[in-house]
Amino acid sequence: MTREEIESREDESMMDAPQINKPKPEEFFNVNYLRIYYGNLFPYSDIHKWLSYGHDGKHPGCDEYYFGRREFSFTLENDVYLRYKSFKNASSMEDAIRSHFPYKIDIGAVYSVDPDKRHAYSQTGSNVFTPVERELVFDIDITDYDDVRYCCSGADVCSKCWPLMTVAIKVIHTSLTEDFGFKHILWVFSGRRGVHCWVCDPKARRMTNEQRSAVAEYFRVYKGNENNARKVALMGYSLHPFLARSYVDYLKGFFEGELQATQSIFSTKDKYEKILAMISDEDIQSELRGKWENSARSSLSEEAISLVRWEQLKNTLQSKKHKAPTLRMCVEEIVFTFTYPRIDLEVSKQMNHLLKAPFCVHPKTGRVCVPIDPNNCDEFDPLAVPTLSQLIEEINSGGSRMDVDDDSDDSDTSLLGKSVKFFRSSFLEPLLKSCKEEIESSYKTKIGKSKDSLSW
């Protein structure tokens, strides 16, 4: 499709919209870009199928109003915020998005009634407006690791600190599948500095707030703040099986390998003093500090210095752990402090909490919120995620397919095609298969009960 055809198609869908001019090369995010993206690349059908959970077919067990009770929110230009949006079907959702061009789309809960008509229902005194279903979600932001990363801070991220997010995905995903038995889990890049997790199994979606809080608290290990030197306190004589598995399979190796190589966390006094403060015994602190200050002029590299000092710390604590119970888990506490996932637990605890939709575009970076394969998350590079400007350039050059519903073999050759294809094949298709089986089973059970009632 030529650029003229693209513009003609856009003009037909948005008669009131201004003429698209060729965006300036230095711009990476603007309404004109969004207009083209939402008009050609956003996977409306896939999002609708996902959030319908099989209730978009003709099976007599389907709830035809299910999708229409889902809350969406739009953040528009100049921070205009529209909440409690709802749509009857995929086409009405697409029409709304293509008419507003939201800077951000958030997805909320499924409510007892249509969110867009909540006020009308409230006046009747019945049909109380309350959330009844919502994915179990997790939000992990790399800014919460600022005290243990030295390459970046704030919203900045690079190849040296992003592996903290990779380890977080591995730890949480393994627990969700092995400890809780969840199967339908979607990990998504936030577009800038973190990751989001959507657990979509029926038993997860139907959890109460109390149950969600219990799951969130299961993952709570990091309890400190910037005023606490000791941010992790592991009690008892041994680790909980979940923590032990995480430590052995992921955290210990990452701490002693990649983290030491990229952050050199013992290489300077400012850095190692943070770690010494985690040791409760002042004599041990003084002993290690003396060793490290005397070796300050070492010719070793920062990475080598860090590794040597880590071994010295472990050996010293091992030889003196009989002095106090708090020393028994000190090595593990240091590793957990630097590497364990720092989840925003409050996001997970409430059904009505909103979370950014997959395939949105982050307005600060222009990057698309693409899915992440948890089985190959080591390969994910946040800096290689396509930006809005790159996608528009690809469209203008004729290198991108216009039909996002295309599922042919060459549909993943475009910048976004591979991500959409992964979403469909690895997440959506298995999920919908399970949902349809559940709908069929529930329907048969309902019919069976009805027959039993009639025969009685």
Image: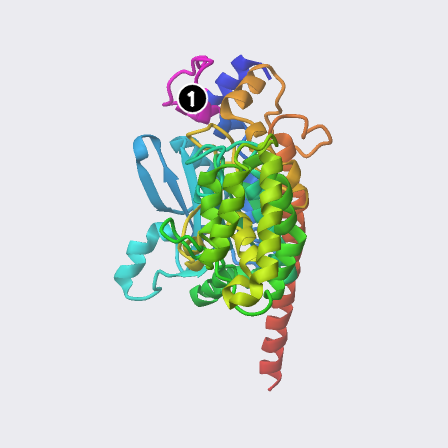
Q: Position of residue 75 (x, y in %)?
A: 36, 37
Locate residue 38 relative to residue 311 in the image: left or right.
Answer: left
Q: Is residue 258 above or below residue 38?
A: below
Is residue 435 visible to us here? no
Segment tinted magenta in the rendering: 11-36
Does the magenta segment cover residue 158?
Answer: no
Viewer-side residue, 410 vs 354: 354
Q: Position of residue 336 (x, y in %)?
A: 54, 53
User: Quadrant of the rendered structure where residue 317 is?
Assistant: bottom right
Q: Which residue is mark 1?
A: 32
Quadrant of the image containing the N terminus: top right
Viewer-side residue, 390 vs 160: 160
Quadrant of the image containing the C terminus: bottom right
Q: Position of residue 321 (x, y in %)?
A: 57, 63
Which residue is painted at 58% across and 28% down in the image? 384
User: Quadrant of the rendered structure where residue 200 is?
Assistant: bottom right
Type of amino acid under label 1:
Asn
Is residue 108 visible to us here? yes
- Badge 1 element: helix
Does the magenta segment cover residue 26?
Answer: yes
Which residue is painted at 43% across and 43% down in the image? 106
**Dot 1, crowdedness within 10 Å: few (<14), some or many (≥20)?**
some
Q: Position of residue 246 (x, y in %)?
A: 62, 56
Which residue is painted at 45% across and 45% down in the image? 273
Locate residue 260 relative to residue 108 in the image: left or right.
Answer: right
Main SS, magenta residues:
loop
Viewer-side residue, 389 vs 344: 344
